[in-house]
Image (tube, rainbow, N blue to C red):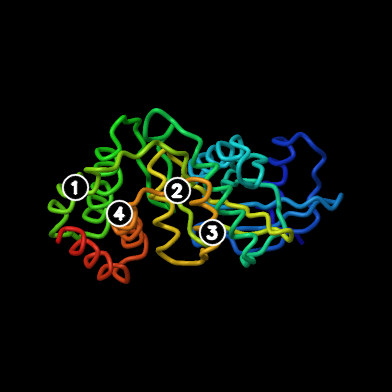
Amino acid sequence: MIDKKHLEVAQKIRELVDCGFSLVEVRSVTGGCIHEAYLYTSSSGEIFFIKLNQVSFLEHFKQEAFALKAIQKTQTIRTPVVLGWGSTLKNSFLALEYIDMNSTSKKRGQSILGEHLAAMHQTLSDRFGWFDNNFIGATPQINPWSPDWVEFYTIHRLEYQFRFAQNSRGYSFKKSDDLLSSVPDYFKSYKPVASLLHGDLWSGNVAFQKEETPVIYDPACFYGDRECEIAFTKMFGGFDSSFYLAYENRWPLDSGFKRRINLYNLYHYLNHFNLFGPSYLDETEQIISILIN
């Protein structure tokens, strides 16, 4: 017996994709820590990947769909095709192409990922930011267009997360002002260009098809310094030397990149503190101290 909420979503999908989609099976699958995720199978054997949440999450799904379409438009790296998004009376949803894939890869897959990501990063803008505000996990991500990367990153990434910590967690990072004032020091001899970024690229948002073709998903896109993306791949691991070698063969990183890794990952440590609480506090404080000393 298929739950009523799934039948209601299936009806919306029929309207969105203009097909005779008839739902015959629903299977719960892993979909991250925010949304429910399901595989919907039709009477014809077609499978859709469905993310489901409360109606209030409709904007999250809209922005995710927008980002996936932007990446797909570059024709550089594989992403699930967006079939549509919408809401019923009680739920919002995002319907995506189902891709059979797994989280492990061989060196070939990692190399392809590095090469394809570098190609995607070569999709450039004359400004930093994005077409709309979106989300990094469940946290709002503010993306006004700006010609100045240092200002953008300082105000709309780090300062925003510091304020969010105070407002949502009631915690004030004592050295935050010192940290914010030190950001320009990291860019005295480096001028980033505005690259299209996935925005939340850790190993949990990458998988591989059987032929080792990489697939990326759950984006939080904006145009920013590509070093942000590469720095985050090092925060939790899961990317091997083949990935980094292939990336740099396609587009070498600046010689000062290693010095900025902690600066860029501070954004994600702050966001993880804001999302998940004190378990990330000590590491975040430690990185702040390293950066200002």
In this rendering, the label closer to the viewer, 4 or 2? 2
Residue 203 visible here? yes
Amino acid at circle 3: Phe
Q: Nearer the viewer, residue 184 or 33?
A: 184
Which disc number belongs to residue 260? 4
State how far apart marks 1 and 4 are (Cα). Answer: 10 Å
- When the figure is inspected, residue 96 is found, relative to residue 286, above or below; the finding is above
Which circle's residue, 1 or 4, is located before the other in the chain? 1
Asked if labels 4 and 1 touch by Cβ distance under 8 angstroms, the answer is no
Three-letter residue code for mark 4: Arg
Q: Amino acid at mark 2?
A: Pro
Instruction: Give the class, few, some or many, for how many residues have Cα within 10 Å of label 1's Cα (few <14, many ≥20).
Output: few
Q: CA distance from mark 2 to mark 3?
A: 13 Å
**Residue 243, labelled with which disc?**
3
Q: Which element is circle 2 on?
A: loop
Residue appearing at x 17%, y 53% in the figure: 179
Q: Residues within 10 Å of mark 3 (few under 14, many from 20)?
A: many
SS state under label 1: helix
Q: Left or right of 37: which side holds 271?
A: left
Q: Is residue 181 left or right of residue 244?
A: left
**Residue identified by numbered label 1:** 185
Q: Residues within 10 Å of mark 2 (few under 14, many from 20)?
A: few
* Left or right, residue 100 beside residue 218: right
The residue where tag 2 is placed is 252
Q: Nearer the viewer, residue 219 or 224?
A: 224
Whole-Å distance between the Cαs marked 3 and 1?
Answer: 29 Å
User: Is 102 placed above or below 257 here?
Assistant: below
Q: Residue at x 60, y 64 (%)?
A: 30
